[in-house]
Image (cartoon, grey):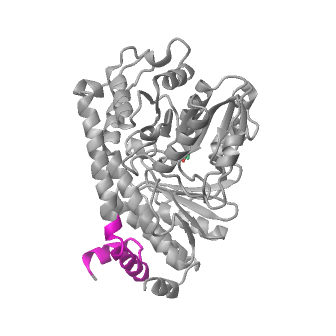
Amino acid sequence: MTDLNKMYASMGIGDAVYEYGSKILEKLKKRFDEIDETAEYNQLKVVRAMQECRVSEACLVGTTGYGYNDLGRDTLEEVYAKVFHTEDALVRPQITCGTHALALALSGNLRPGDELLSPVGRPYDTLEEVIGIRPSRGSLAEYGVTYRQVDLLPDGGFDFDKIRRSINQRTRLVTIQRSKGYQTRPTLSVARIGELIAFIKSIRPDILCMVDNCYGEFVETAEPGDVGADMTVGSLIKNPGGGLAPIGGYIAGTKECVENAACRLTSPGLAKEVGASLGVLKDLYQGFFLAPTVTAAALKAAVFAANLYEPLGFAVVPDSSESRHDIIQAITFGRPDAVIAFCQGIQAGAPVDSHVTPQPWDMPGYDAQVIMAAGAFVSGSSIELSADGPIRPPYAVYFQGGLTWQHAKFGILKSLQALLDGGIVSEEALRLGAV
Ligand SMILES: *Cc1c(COP(=O)(O)O)cnc(C)c1O
């Protein structure tokens, strides 16, 4: 046994799991090199933006009260706009989460009588109440904004004919979700998002295209703003916060779209001028600086998990070899006990709260019970190693994050160990899978 071997053994990873994991990893060197190269490009992109915007020590200090002339806040928004290749950005601790950022982008840019179109199928669960697909207090539907949806084709392609027929005079905004979210459809690449935006603009150039970029930031060298998105929206407790942002969301887009969203966040007339940054700016800057390499760690984790579980007979999306456009790995177990064991294994590998055992519960915004593993420094952060699964068929877990690759590897091995200990996979399967 090597020292490393012994270290894993002391932390509950048995020989069978360790050996199997090592065999799988040997095959992933080239993939990992490619991920590192993307991270290198994106690291330079972020540093260049920070230099060009003249980020200074004074930017790291926050304001209180109204927050007028907050240099750090305004400069950070310039940095985001440069990196996402947009005219402007709204990056605020007052944006409480990704859903809030998306709700601001939508409600700020839609007016009564307008129609919202999703040409990529059902949106993320929490947006159903924002839009009013599931009736909810304060939804867009209550304000007279209607919604239409075109599903992806069975092969994951865009249904261009149906999209064309669904666009009418009232269509004002198109929402494109990059990541699969809680579905097993493929995630959209930035190139495919560009193709869809070009198609929509060819029908009516004045239709606004918004991309829900959650989990997609820094996975590729391009972002939706590079392919014509009017708004790119996401959460700071996912990729762009780099694990350090304690809260926040962003909307990067055209001047007008960002101004409209800011009028919703603060107030008409005040828009971006108010909003004290308090003490969080240093973490937002440093987190953004770290985000490319943190995203790379999370991406390696997702690739490793796919390659680990696929040979054991579980359906994985994306599969072990396909290209990646977000950091989420879906693994379909087909049985609830496996979803629970997987999440409990991830939790047992966490730096925080490793001693607690997660259970399924009714979460606000979701229509089924959900089990979540999140032993995170920032509560609910899903750029940190985390897993969640709605307890409903097909009993899939959605696994994401990992601030360091080394920690993510440990957590994933813990999940497999939990499945082995629970009798859901056998040592025999690990031996067969390793060949
Ligand atoms: C996480 C996520 C959201 C919502 O973000 P929260 O911070 O959980 O509110 C929206 N869309 C997608 C695709 C997401 O992954």
Q: Position of residue 168 (x, y in %)?
A: 71, 33
Residue at horizontal 52 percent and vertical 11 percent from the top: 269
The answer to whether residue 310 is above or below residue 241 is below
The residue lying toward the viewer, choosing from 300 and 253, is: 253
Q: Quadrant of ligand 1?
A: top right
Seen at 46% across and 36% down, the residue is: 247
Seen from the viewer's position, the closer of residues 215 and 166 is 166
Is 82 positioned to the left or the right of 174 in the image? left
Q: Pinpoint residue 295: horizontal percent, then vertical percent.
A: 38, 52
In the picture, which quadrant includes the N terminus? Answer: bottom left
Res. 130 visible in picture: no
Image x and y of residue 103, in percent: 60, 32
Seen in the image, is 424 located left or right of residue 146? left
**From the image, which quarter does the C terminus lie in?**
bottom left
Most foreground residue, 84 or 392: 84
Q: Is residue 15 magenta-colored?
A: yes
Question: Does 130 lie within the magenta span?
Answer: no
Which secondary structure dominates the residues rendered in magenta? helix
How many marks the image carries: the answer is 0
- Residue 142 place in picture, x, y as percent: 75, 28
Above or below: residue 353 compared with residue 115: below
| Image position of 171 (left or right of 109) | right
Residue with the most extreme top position? 269
Residue 257 versus residue 249 in the image, above or below: above
Q: Quadrant of residue 148?
A: top right
Residue range in magenta is 2-31
Q: Is residue 343 visible?
A: yes
> Residue drawn 42% across and 21% down?
276
Compared to 367, does 138 lie above or below?
above
